[in-house]
Amino acid sequence: MPSRGKSTRPARRLRRVDETSAGGLVVDAERDVPAAALIGRIDRKGRLLWSLPKGHIELGESPEDTAVREVAEETGIIGEILAPLGVIDFWFVADGRRIHKTVHHFLLLAVGGALSDEDIEVNEVAWVPLEELSAKLAYADERALAERAPRLLADIA
């Protein structure tokens, strides 16, 4: 007799996929109060979540090239790499796959462009003062990276 509430079928094993992305924290140091460009996306629950711009590394592209490209595509800001900021590593499930994602982040200096949310993957963009990043960023691992930025900027200057 089958047991109640339990499936008699074996659990379906999800296919594991490794993905690598890059992005960064682009800072406008010329503002009265230095600020970083963040992107906002609406999640499945309808919440606006703020994060650092990032995206997939394309064939033949270095993580640094990807970071510059993705920052420009998602924020409209042209950035120049100043230093590595750190690597984030996490797992999630999507489209019947178990995805292991590694994201290389860089600290960039804004050298041109204009803040824009024209990328279809982005709902909003904003300049956020560096001291407010921890309160604005949705993900703890990105908050930890953002906390490194002021010290790195001071060391570079």
Image: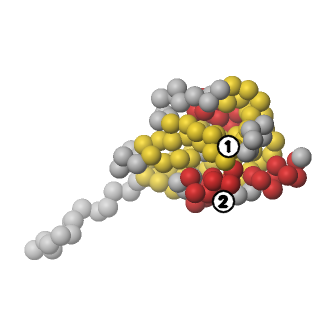
Q: Position of residue 17 (x, y in %)?
A: 51, 48
Q: Amino acid at mark 1?
A: Ala
- Name the residue located 73 percent from the left edge and 45 percent from the top edge: 33
40 up-or-down from 114: above or below: below
Q: Earlier in the sequence, mark 2 or mark 1?
A: 1
- Name the residue located 74 percent from the left edge and 38 percent from the top edge: 31
Tell me the SS state at disc 1: strand
- Name the residue located 77 percent from the left edge and 48 percent from the top edge: 84
1 up-or-down from 155: above or below: below
Horizontal side of 148 relative to 39 (left or right) equals right
How far is the residue under mark 2 from the one under mark 1? 15 Å
Tell me the SS state at disc 2: helix
Around disc 2, counting alpha carbons within 10 Å, would you say few (fewer than 14), some (14 to 19), or many (20 or more)?
some
Q: Looking at the image, is mark 2 or mark 1 nearer the viewer? A: 1
Q: Amino acid at mark 2?
A: Ala
Q: Which residue is mark 1?
A: 36
Around disc 1, counting alpha carbons within 10 Å, would you say few (fewer than 14), some (14 to 19), or many (20 or more)?
many
Q: Position of residue 43 (x, y in %)?
A: 41, 46
Q: Position of residue 77 (x, y in %)?
A: 67, 30
For residue 30, say whether it is visible: yes
Q: Which residue is mark 2?
A: 144
Question: Residue pushed farthest left?
Answer: 1
